Image (cartoon, rainbow, N blue to C red):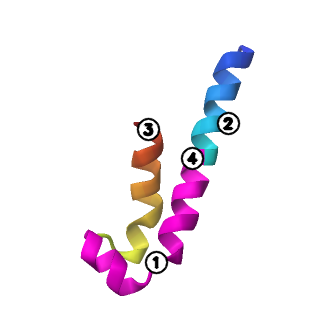
Amino acid sequence: MNIQSIATKVQKWRQYRTSVRELSRLTDRELHDLGIGRSDIAFVARQSSKA
């Protein structure tokens, strides 16, 4: 593994954690309005960090 690939993985992990944190702060109503269930937060965050 080179330094660039490690840096990319760290960046994606940070983006994932940020997404989880922000989505977790929303109310159930706000999540519902977005079409996301509370149990879907990790999945949605994982998908956003892949983009």
Pinpoint residue 38: horizontal percent, then vertical percent: 41, 76
Q: Position of residue 3 (x, y in %)?
A: 74, 17
State the extent of the magenta-drawn residues as a range: 15-35
Q: Amino acid at mark 2?
A: Val
Confirm or deny contact between disc 3 and disc 2 (CB under 8 A): no
Which residue is the site of mark 4? 15
Q: Quadrant of the C terminus?
A: top left
- 21 lies above or below 8: below
**Which dot marks residue 26?**
1
Q: Secondary structure at mark 1?
A: loop
Tell me which label, 3 or 4, sits earlier in the chain.
4
Give the spatial CA distance, label 2 vs label 1.
25 Å
**What residue lies at 62% left-to-right and 32% top-to-bottom?**
9
Kindly report the distance in space between the C-alpha atoms of the residues bearing marks 3 and 1: 22 Å
Instruction: Name which residue lies at 67% across and 36% down.
Output: 10
To which residue does mark 3 refer?
A: 50
> Residue at coordinates 67% horizontally, 17% vertically from top-left?
4
Residue indicated by mark 2: 10
Residue in the image at 56% along x and 46% along y: 15
Check residue 1 for magenta coloring. Answer: no
Which amino acid, by three-letter code, is at mark 4? Answer: Gln
Q: Are marks 3 and 4 in contact (CB under 8 Å)?
A: no
Q: Which residue is most to the right? A: 3
Label 3: how many Cα within 10 Å (few below 14, some 14–19, many 20+): few
What kind of element bears circle 2?
helix
Q: Earlier in the sequence, mark 4 or mark 1?
A: 4
Sequence-first disc among 4 and 2: 2
The dominant secondary structure in magenta is helix
- Residue density around tag 1, few if under 14, some if 14–19, many if 20 or more, within 10 Å: few
Label 2: few (<14), some or many (≥20) within 10 Å?
few
Tell which of 33 and 1 is nearer to you: 33
